[in-house]
Image (spheres, grey):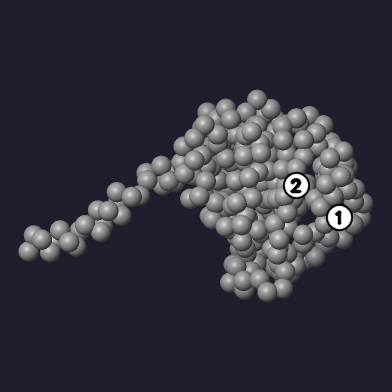
Amino acid sequence: MKQRILLFLLPLLLLTGCASPQLSPRHDVALSFDSERIAYNVAGEGRTALIFIHGWNCDARYWQEQVPVFAKDYQVITMDLAGHGHSSLDRADFTMLSFARDVQAVIEREHIDRAILIGHSMGGSVIAEAARLMPGQVIGIIGVDTLQNVAERTPQSVIDDMIQPFEADFRTATQGFVASMFPAGSDPRLMRWIKEDMSSAPKDGALSAFRNYTGQYVDGEAAAVFEEITVPVVSINARLWPTAPEENSKHIKDYRLFYIEDTGHFPMLEKPNEFNGLLAAAIQAIES
């Protein structure tokens, strides 16, 4: 009888023994500059912290395929910017600088002095602001399908026309917007989840963030932010929208571009294995 019980328990004991407590996420909350509560998760340990910043209307879950891979060698932090996910949403104006200060709040709470910031979509602008805000702690930034052309200028009238459908029918406009971010033949389950998830965001905060994000390309701030950034900047971009590396290099002092093929706007979820390989190469390029 004892032998039978031991045979039953042995696989469970082996599984438990193989699970690293370092890879089990720890959850916490940081207080941002305006008392917004910023929810974040920590997994792994390492000299360098990798801080993953989601895009517009997304949250920490969008990095689910990266956390277990990179937490083996790094301290990995995923977080929900104010107005997103499990963070509070009492802020009046969701600017890129205010989001960057959310990142700063997490970095300060975790006492991080060496960080690589990884930002998807709108998160690319957030990590640029954060790098300008914390030059002593940020050693590099990696944009994911973002920073296609920081020198691009867009008239305010064009931005107004873009926002109008979201103001009229936020859910329908957001779902159509997300659908356009996937190439033909994409995983329909992934598409459905992201369409439903992003279109469920609180409308007022989402529109505030959208206006501030796109507004950088009206006043030139998208390029100006890099005047004070000297750390390496890497893009991992799909070919859904054209990237202009020559234009970026005029404004970004140390710029490198990696392409990921045959994906849409969410390569970290669409092709996680290929993306993780490129991300590892980008991290190595910064650390070396």
Query: Which residue type carries mark 2?
Result: Leu
Residue at 75% in and 67% down: 180
Residue 7, image x, y percentages: 17, 61
Could you tell me if the residues under marks 1 and 2 are in contact, i.e. CB atoms within 8 Å? no
Query: Which residue type carries mark 1?
Result: Ile
Give whichever of 141, 245 is nearer the camera.
245
Q: Earlier in the sequence, mark 1 or mark 2?
A: 1
Residue 253, image x, y percentages: 80, 34
Q: State the image quarter where residue 284 is shown.
A: top right
Q: CA distance from mark 1 to mark 2?
A: 27 Å
Residue at 70% in and 57% down: 260
> Can you identify the residue that label 2 sits on?
257
Residue 212, image x, y percentages: 78, 47
Q: State the image quarter where residue 248 is shown.
A: top right
Figure label count: 2
Residue at 65% in and 25% down: 136
The residue tagged with tag 1: helix, strand or loop? Answer: helix
User: In the image, which is nearer the foreground, mark 1 or mark 2?
Assistant: 2
> Can you identify the residue that label 1 sits on?
159
Q: Is residue 13 visible?
A: yes
Q: Quadrant of the C terminus?
A: top right
Residue 248: mark in rendering: none
Q: Is residue 195 left or right of residue 254?
A: left
Residue at 57% in and 40% down: 50
How dense is the environment of label 1, judged by Cα within 10 Å: few (below 14), some, or many (20 and up)?
some
Q: Quadrant of the N terminus?
A: bottom left
The residue tagged with tag 2: helix, strand or loop? Answer: strand
Give whichever of 170, 218 is nearer the camera.
218
